[in-house]
Image (cartoon, helix red, strand yellow):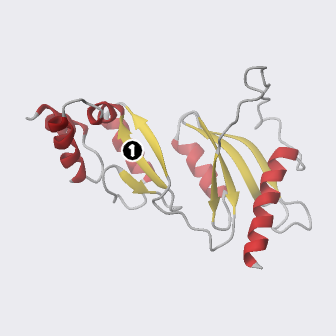
Amino acid sequence: MQRMRTLSLFLLAAGSLLTGFVPQDPATTEPKAATPATATMPRITTALWFPNDAEPAVRFYVSVFADGKILDEARWPEGGFGPKGSLISATFRVAGMELIAISGNSQSRFNEAMSLMVTVETQKEIDDYWQKLSADGKGQCGWTKDKFGVSWQIVPRELLAMMADKDPAKVKRVSMAMMQMQKLDLAKLQQAFAGA
C-alpha cells in the first residue's frame, strides 16, 4: 500500500510538471520553444526524490551555483496529499544542468550509486564547492555528500585528461595519489602525473 501511494505521488508530481495544473509564476519560468531538430529528440533530466520536503534542498542548490535558478514549481492545492502550498516538485538549473526535485516520503534515501559531478578548472573552485557541498568535510577521491544526502564529485577537468592519458604508468600514479585524498589536491595530482 505504501509503495502504491509513493508511486502515485511520483506520478502526480511528474504529471503536474507536464500539465502545469498549478498556476506558474511568470518571473520563475522561461518559455522553451521546440525547434524541428529538437522536437523529436529524447531528453533526460535527473530527478531527485527527497525525503519529505524538497524545497530547502532546491533553495540551497540554486544558492551554491552562480547560474542557479528555479525554473518551475508545482505546489499542492487545497485537499492535496500535502499541506496546501507545499512543494510537490521543482525544476531548477545549476551549472547549466536542469534537475527536478520531488518531495517524497520519509523512507526515500540517496546513496553513492548516483552522484552529481561538478567539473572545475582551479583549486580555488575545488575548495569552494567542497566547502559548500560537503556536509562534514569528509569524502573520498573527490566524492562527498551534502546535508541532504546527495553525493557530489568535485573534479578538476585536468584530472579527467590525466586519467585518459595513453601512458599507463602516469595513470596509475595519478590514481594512487587520488585514492589517498578526500578533497582533491590539483597540485599533488599534477606532481604524481609528472612523476615528481
Q: Quadrant of the C terminus?
A: top left
Q: Position of residue 79 (x, y in %)?
A: 92, 68
Q: Position of residue 5 (x, y in %)?
A: 78, 72
Q: Is residue 73 left or right of residue 165?
A: right
Vertical side of 142 occupied by 103: above or below: below
Front one among 147 and 34: 34
Three-letter amino acid code of the residue under disc 1: Ile
Number of marks in picture:
1
Farthest left residue in view: 196
Q: Is residue 161 left or right of residue 134?
A: left
Q: Quadrant of the N terminus?
A: bottom right
The residue located at (30%, 51%) in the rendering is 141
Res. 91 image quadrant? top right
Label 1 sits on residue: 154
Farthest bottom residue in view: 1
Q: Secondary structure at mark 1?
A: strand
Q: Is residue 148 left or right of residue 37?
A: left
The residue located at (23%, 29%) in the rendering is 166
Q: Label 1 crowding class (10 Å Cα cut-off): few <14, some 14-19, many 20+?
A: many
Q: Position of residue 176 (x, y in %)?
A: 19, 48
